[in-house]
Image: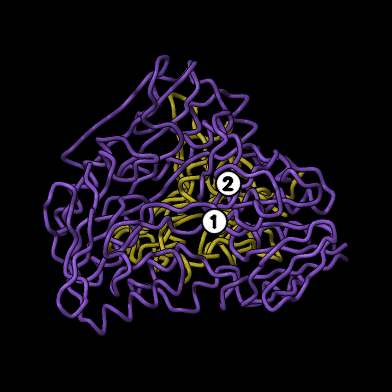
Amino acid sequence: MKRIFIREEFCINCRLCEVYCIVQNSKTRNILKAYKGEYPKPQPRVRVEEKGHLSFALQCRHCEDAPCLEACLTGAMGRDPSTDAVLCDEERCVGCWMCIMVCPFGVIRRNREGRRVISKCNLCQGEIIPVCVKNCPNEAIVYEEER
Amino acid sequence: MNYLIIGAGPAGSAAAEAIREVDSEGTITMISEEPLALYAKPLITDLLAQKIQRTQIIWKGENFCSAHRIHLQTGKRAIRLDIPRREVVVNRGERIGYDRLLIATGGRPIALSIPGVELPGVFSFTRLSDADALAQFVRSRKAKSAVVIGGGMIGLKATEALLEQGLEVSIVEMADRLLAATFDRPASSIVEEALQKKGCQVFLQNTATQILSGRSGQVEGVMLRDRKKLPCHLVIVAIGVTPNIDLAREATISCHRGIRVDSTMQTSQDGIYAAGDCCEMQDFFGAGPRVIAIWPNAVRQGKVAGHNMAGQKDRYEGSLAMNAVEIGGVATVSVGMTDPEGEGYEIRKIWNPQKSIYKKLVLKEEVIVGAIFVEDMDRAGIYTGLIRNRIPVSDFKEHLLKEDFGLIYLPQAFRKHLVTGEGMEV
């Protein structure tokens, strides 16, 4: 499958990935409305971590042996048979937070935008390239076939 | 190869899936004594709270059995194992043969032996039938108040559902805290306060000694050890679950509290495996053997059992106690040894009662062995990962509980291994 690979040495901590992720997950898909007109404000599914000069963007790794899949008791968390992406069906999620408890990357969060469900990267279903990758100015995250 | 799985819970279904990964030819038969199989028992809370549709409790989806070619037989109770003939006797004397057997019979609620437990209006809360009977009772009796005996995971979930239904609820717990398996006192106190704000009373270090009935034979209240009377219309008994081991024990398979298994999930009998809430083994820290009856462990054990049954070597790492629960609007995650007794433990914590934020880490020999997160819990899984991978934290110990703590503080080699896209073994 295609995955997002992180190249921390190229990250310039501009956080454009977070901005585009917010817009992608907003109702209006309009940057000004997403930031100023939508309440609650959409959450980014990608997160830039920083420490001194080091930074990198981190989102769901769509693990091969995904602990969230084992912990999910509703069947909401599942693997897409065509892309192998780990996706959450929000209709089935009840917000038990079991996946949050076991994700070693800490990339699943409580969704603060509405119903009690989780929020995570879905590799921008429907897009050819995830928006965080597409808009990264320095190829600090790349979307490639697994090496 | 004929595979037979007794039980259709998370362990049984994970095993069936794992067998199918390895063996596309073999016959997989799964029997369940309940009329409805493959549903998620924890979701009966959400069903009772009317947060989900009835169809949503089928967690693996309707076509799970056809997709994996599993012969599912519901309403069939395994009565006896005939090990020499490699057969399981089910109700009405029918026999089902096997080459490899998995016992995934789960647990059953521990019975409370006090006067009045047989009254109508006293319920356990582990099966769909319990939730249905309870919902029916609340409607027909127009029940307004309940006492939940037991402040563990099931008791708390039942409390939450009843509160959402508008009932007044009191919890009675024997220990000095709620969720005694993975909470410490401060974590419990935050949750207690949140519950009290919702009108729920919490009685700790106390037990029910009698369930009181009125003239009509209906539940009227619960008498506590300290002679306090709690008036109520219904009682939920949730003092724990005990492994269903009768089948195994009567067949002279080695059992203690649960069915004994090795790290491949095999029992003392060759070709017979056990997984999920019915079995016991050394825990993740090498203590025990003990039973840690939680969902993710059951799935993992089922998977390991399934692989080994089908001939692919796999090993179970040992169970780690953990709970994720949101109650009274307070979200919590608690993992491992959170309140250990004895020497050699280092405790690090942050407590902000105003914001209900509490974070605690327990370290031993520079490795995290326990963690509690109250409210600020969205990245708690990172710590679960550090526990599971036994990562020494000496180099970044000072940063562990900082607000911006993340993968970036981890040793570069380990971080690279994580973020280069390889799945991490956990």
The spot of residue B169 in percent (x, y) is: 20, 62
Chain appearing in yellow on the rendered image: A
Determine whether B282 is above or below A35 in the image: above
Q: Residue at x 30, y 50 (%)?
A: B151
Instruction: Please tell me in which quadrant of the rendered image residue B26 appears.
Output: bottom right
Q: Can the viewer see residue A134?
A: no
Q: Residue furthest bottom?
A: B140
Q: Which color mode does the image show?
A: by chain
Q: Chain of mark 1?
A: A
The N terminus of chain B sits in image quarter? bottom right
- Mark 2 against mark 1, which lies toward the viewer? 2
Where is mark 2, residue-wise?
A: B258
Q: Secondary structure at mark 2?
A: loop
The color chain B is rendered in: purple
Q: Amino acid at mark 1?
A: Val
Instruction: Please tell me in which quadrant of the rendered image residue A125 appears.
Output: bottom right
Q: Amino acid at mark 2?
A: Gly
The spot of residue B14 in percent (x, y) is: 66, 58
Q: Residue at x 37, y 43 (%)?
A: B377
Count of number-bearing discs: 2
Determine whether B367 is above or below B293 in the image: above
Q: Can the viewer see residue B243?
A: yes
Badge number at residue B329? none
